[in-house]
Amino acid sequence: MGGVSLTDYIEKNATNKSVPSVKKVALLGAPLNGLSIGDDGKTPYDLTPTGPAMQSERYAELLKNSSVISNKLEVLNVAGDTKDGRKSDGSVSIASALSGKFIYKRAASYKEKIITGKEGKHSNLHDSEKVDKWIADFLWD
């Protein structure tokens, strides 16, 4: 399940006792605030101390519903940076992925990791031994 869909699922099922409750979530290059990537590494969606400078429609909806996210949830959010100057994994900007910190602000814990270089390419995130270790340490901590 993709990170945006999983976030939507967590919000929509926060009080639904007929489905399993989510205790931990690991997001990999999730385009939480859209897919805009600037050639110079800047987008209208870049992060400010209080949130994204601009919100995609989907992000605004996720943020609006974020108050139902459990304060017992633990989150690991991994973003990639290919280091080509665009501040992205080639598909998702770092700002879009890390905008999750504002959606998951109620979570018991929220950790961010950025992987760089060749491993930081979107399609390589799930193949990286470093990312695998981060996820394993997070899930079995």
Image: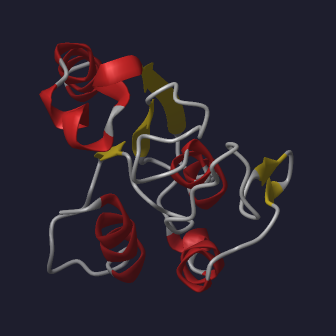
Q: Residue at x 36, y 28 (%)?
A: 120
Colour mode of the rendering: secondary structure
Q: Which quadrant, please, contains the N terminus?
A: bottom left
> Looking at the rendering, which quadrant does residue 24 occupy?
top left
Left or right of 19 in this view: 37: right
Q: Residue at x 44, y 29 (%)?
A: 82
> Looking at the rendering, which quadrant does residue 125 occupy?
top left
Left or right of 12 in this view: 110: right
Residue 2 percent across, percent down from the top left: 25, 62
Q: Nearer the viewer, residue 93 or 75?
A: 93
Q: How many callouts does the rendering have?
A: 0
Residue 56 percent across, percent down from the top left: 63, 78
Residue 19 percent across, percent down from the top left: 15, 74
| Up/down of 124 relative to 9, above or below | above
Residue 16 percent across, percent down from the top left: 28, 81
Q: Residue at x 47, y 59 (%)?
A: 70
| Up/down of 58 relative to 129, above or below | below
Q: Which quadrant, please, contains the C terminus?
A: top left
| Up/down of 121 relative to 66, above or below | above
Left or right of 128 in this view: 30: right
Q: Nearer the viewer, residue 71 or 80?
A: 80
